[in-house]
Amino acid sequence: MPSPLVSTLVQSAADSNDNAGGSFVFTLVFFGLIGAAMYFLMIRPQRRRMRQTADLQKSITEGDEILTTSGMYGFVTAMDGDTVWLSIADDVEVRVSRAAIARKVVEGGGEVAADDEGDSKSSS
């Protein structure tokens, strides 16, 4: 005669097989919700930031003051494809990649971030 523990385990295994269809649908819906949450919380904002950064880098023209990702300020003196020449001091020019441009410095001394370029927020 089987012990009570073995009969309890056999009974619970039989019960879990009866409810397997419902738990599979729940699992499928759960993973679908996880995928949707990842898209809206991670992937979509990252794509928007990448698009804004690319737009900022394309909008740079000669004479603009910029800040590079390494923290160097300079004025754009020439552009050649993906290469940008910056004047960082009198008679000192450096060559940087267009992808290294982080921000465009505004005339008033402030900076326009790649994320905030199109946004105009006023505080009251």
Image: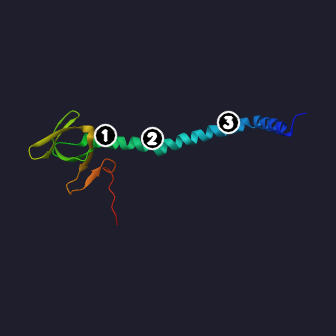
What residue lies at 35% left-to-right and 41% top-to-bottom? 51
Q: Is residue 64 visible?
A: no
On screen, residue 118 versus residue 5, left or right, reads left
Nearest the viewer among 123 and 8 is: 8
Q: CA distance from mark 3 to mark 2?
A: 27 Å
Query: What is the spatial separation of the Cα atoms under label 1 and label 2, in whole angstroms?
Result: 17 Å
* Residue name at image x 83 percent, y 39 percent: 5
Number of other residues with Cα within 10 Å of mark 3, as a class: few under 14, some 14 to 19, many 20 or more: few
Residue 43 badge? 2
Query: Which comes sooner in the sequence, label 3 or label 2?
Result: 3
Percent position of residue 121, x then y:
34, 58
The answer to whether marks 3 and 2 mark residues whose Cβ atoms lie closer than 8 Å is no
Residue type beneath disc 1: Ala
Which mark is first along the chain, 2 or 1?
2
Q: Which mark is residue 24?
A: 3
**How many numbered circles are shown?**
3
Residue 83 at what x, y percent from top left? 21, 35
Secondary structure beneath label 3: helix
| Rendered location of residue 39, percent (x, y) | 49, 41
Residue at figure coordinates x 34%, y 64% from the top left: 123
As drawn, 109 above or below 56: below
Q: Which residue is mark 1?
A: 54
Q: Decide which of tag 3 and tag 1 comes sooner along the chain.
A: 3
At x 37%, y 44%, the residue is 49
SS class of the residue under badge 2?
helix
Labelled pair 3, 1 in contact (Cβ < 8 Å): no
| Amino acid of disc 2 | Ile
